[in-house]
Image (tube, rainbow, N blue to C red):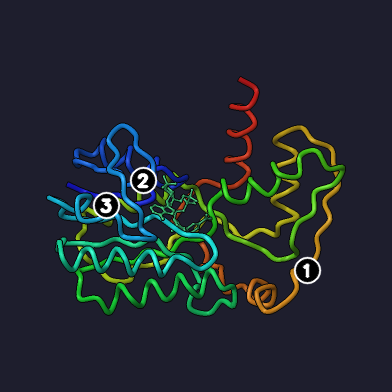
């Protein structure tokens, strides 16, 4: 039995579907009840003992905003210590060990806690998901211009990340594995233009530098992986698919 935390999230849904399709028995963890769901809260630890009963591997995709990631990971590790599993797979983000963003620093702390826990583990870092980038453009759809930060990113298909996670579940504990990233590094301006072309939008794009230490980390590109990334789907392809499904 594989327990997936964050199963209801953007990455969790395709991961649960692919694990199930590839023959694994899957239990989804959420704070809300639903089909195939075990209710638990990683912030408090409530329900984790029941969630881990009979589980051999945990795919930990849940994420708390505002630097609560490591708090949730601590609760999970505490529960696993009482109900051991053979393999813990953790989803992290490229560059967390070098980035000034508080959320990334906390994600790095989660990595360190897992590596020091004695639990057999795999850590996969990925770049930013296509759907995460798209949210920035969708949120501005009623504005006359699209405002974006001035750095580049290397976005990745969430479905391809899910496929990689299934491979890693099957591979067994591998510690930190090669970063998983999209096929190209593009500026946010280029990505916004691709989004606008795909959605037949005529609008200007303004790019502004992101201030502060986090902005400097992004400008230095610590969130980028080497090229070419292992994933294949481009942001332009994602944007076209998104536009086509919005028309249906
Ligand atoms: N977004 C990106 O571009 C990106 C890039 C690289 C890596 N990642 C990492 O990939 C993972 C998945 O990201 P995502 O974008 O799919 O996340 P998401 O859509 O924001 O989903 C977050 C998930 O976390 C669960 N969760 C939050 N607090 C919880 C709590 N206290 N107890 C139990 N579950 C809790 C939620 O479950 P319920 O609401 O159902 O309880 C939800 O399923 C995260 O670790 C993220 O940091 C993201």
Residue lying farthest to the top in this orientation: 248
Front-most of residues 31 and 206: 31
User: What residue appears at the point 25 percent right and 62 percent down from the top-left corner?
Assistant: 88
Q: What x and y, as percent, mark residue 13?
A: 40, 40
Q: Residues within 10 Å of mark 3 (few under 14, many from 20)?
A: some
Q: Residues within 10 Å of mark 1 (few under 14, many from 20)?
A: few
**How far apart in space, not on screen, are marks 1 and 2 (Cα)?**
37 Å
**Image quarter of residue 173:** bottom left
**Image quarter of residue 8:** top left
Q: Which mark is residue 146?
A: none
**How far apart in space, not on screen, are marks 3 and 1 (Cα)?**
43 Å
Q: Earlier in the sequence, mark 2 or mark 3?
A: 2
Q: What x and y, as percent, mark residue 44?
A: 35, 60
Q: Is residue 237 visible?
A: yes
In the rendered image, which residue does mark 2 sit on? Answer: 30
In the rendered image, which residue does mark 1 sit on? Answer: 209
Q: Earlier in the sequence, mark 1 or mark 2?
A: 2
Q: Is residue 229 visible?
A: no
In the rendered image, which residue does mark 3 sit on? Answer: 47
User: What residue appears at the point 70 percent right and 36 percent down from the top-left corner?
Assistant: 198
Q: Circle 2 sits in a helix, a strand or a loop, which is it? A: strand
Do the residues bearing badges 1 and 2 touch, measured as CB atoms within 8 Å?
no
Q: Horizontally, is 52 left or right of 215 in the view?
A: left
Nearer the observer: mark 2 or 3; the answer is: 3
């Amino acid at each position: 039995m594989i327990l997936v935390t964050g199963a209801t999230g953007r990455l969790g849904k395709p991961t649960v579907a692919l694990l199930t399709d590839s023959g694994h028995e899957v239990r989804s963890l959420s704070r809300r009840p639903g089909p195939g769901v075990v209710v638990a809260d990683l912030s408090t630890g409530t329900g984790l003992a029941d969630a881990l009963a009979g589980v051999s591997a945990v795919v930990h995709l849940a994420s708390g905003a505002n630097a609560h990631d490591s708090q949730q990971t601590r609760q999970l590790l505490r529960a696993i210590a009482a109900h051991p599993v053979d393999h813990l797979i953790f989803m992290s983000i490229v560059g967390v060990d070098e980035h000034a963003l508080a959320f990334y620093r906390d994600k790095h702390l989660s990595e360190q806690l897992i590596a020091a826990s004695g639990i057999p583990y795999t850590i996969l870092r990925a770049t930013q998901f296509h759907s995460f980038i798209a949210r920035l453009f969708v949120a501005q759809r009623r504005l006359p211009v699209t405002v974006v930060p001035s750095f580049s990113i290397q976005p990745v298909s969430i479905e391809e990340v899910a496929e990689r996670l299934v491979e890693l579940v099957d591979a067994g504990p591998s510690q930190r594995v090669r970063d998983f990233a999209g096929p190209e590094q593009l500026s946010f301006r280029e990505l916004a233009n691709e989004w606008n072309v795909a959605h037949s939008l005529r609008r200007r794009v303004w790019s502004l530098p992101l201030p502060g230490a986090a902005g400097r980390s992004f400008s230095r590109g610590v969130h980028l992986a080497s090229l070419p990334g292992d994933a294949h789907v481009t942001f332009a392809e994602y944007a076209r698919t998104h536009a086509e499904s919005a028309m249906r």
